[in-house]
Amino acid sequence: MSIIKKLYIETSRGQVHGRITARRLGLPVVLLHQTASSSAMYERLMAELAADFWLVALDTPGFGQSFVPVERPSTAFYATILWQALGQLDIGFCHLFGHHTGAAIAVQMADAAPEQVGKLILSGPPLLSQALIERLQAGLQPIMPDADGRFLTETWQRLRHKAPDAPLDLILRETLLTIQAGPSYPLAYEAVFDQPFAAQLAGLSQPTLLLAGEQDSLHACLQPAHALLPHSTLRSLPDADGYLCDRQPERVAAVLREFLC
């Protein structure tokens, strides 16, 4: 029997797709992915932790196999829908793990329903300066199909440049997921840019772990985030990048076991 199953969950706006471990052990740990990935980025981490925790990884609306929102999404919209999905699984209280955009959504979910969150793990928390937001906005190009397929190679090259030594199958997966996301890809970034993340982060009362690989593009956000949330725990992983859950799941699993147990 597979230790990870796929499922679709009905919400008020459409179906949310996700992955779930078979054994329901203790308090659920909900995993929220970066843009423009999907719950697929957590398969190796889920396999590592399946004997210790009940894990649920959800595709954000607009990504993976979840429904595509009709309206312009916000992090509040994402949080509402994901809480609805968890409610359909009878999950009313859980730990949250979010990576990059997923960390932003995790903070939004904790802000909206603090009584439903036990602990938070924020991997690459996007505490973005205005200069960084402007730089990211300048690089957000819509993915538009063209007759000669240039959009395919441009997406591949951009992701390959981001992690030149990453395995080709990882770059292929992320390239296909980014192309599939299409218009949802820049909208998720814009939702994070508009989120009052700093104020929400500073208001967290839950035990919180701030985590990032040293080569993560958001590693520089760790110390400012810790300054806003001084009761948080800070972990920086040497020789790890933004794909740490895919490439070093054993190390991430060890950090989660230490923090959550």
Image (cartoon, rainbow, N blue to C red):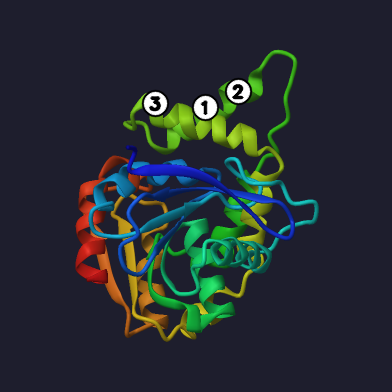
Name the amino acid type tagged 3. Asp
Q: Pointer 2: what residue? A: 152
Disc sitting over residue 2 in the figure: none
Residue 190 in sight: yes
Quarter of the figure with residue 83: bottom right
Residue 176: x and y in percent read: 55, 29
Give the residue at mark 1: 156
Alpha carbons under labels 2 and 1: distance apart: 6 Å
Along the line of sight, the residue nearer the viewer: 127 or 92: 92
In the depicted view, which residue is nearer to us: 252 or 31? Answer: 31
Type of amino acid at the residue the image marks with label 1: Trp
Location of residue 115 in the rendering, given as x and y in whole percent from the top left corner: 49, 84
Residue at (65% x, 19% y) in the render: 150
Q: Residue at coordinates 62% horizontally, 70% vertically from top-left?
A: 195
Q: Are marks 3 and 2 in contact (CB under 8 Å)?
A: no
Choose between 27 and 176: the one closer to the eye.
27
Disc 3 to disc 2, C-alpha distance: 15 Å
Where residue 256 sits: x, y (%)?
26, 62
Q: Determine which residue is flagged by label 3.
A: 169
Query: What residue is at 29 percent from the left and 45 percent from the top?
Result: 47
Separation of residues labelled 1 and 3 (CA atoms): 11 Å
Label 3: few (<14), some (14–19) or many (≥20) C-alpha neighbours in 10 Å:
few
Quadrant location of the N terminus in the rendered image: top left
In contact (CB < 8 Å): disc 2 and disc 1: yes
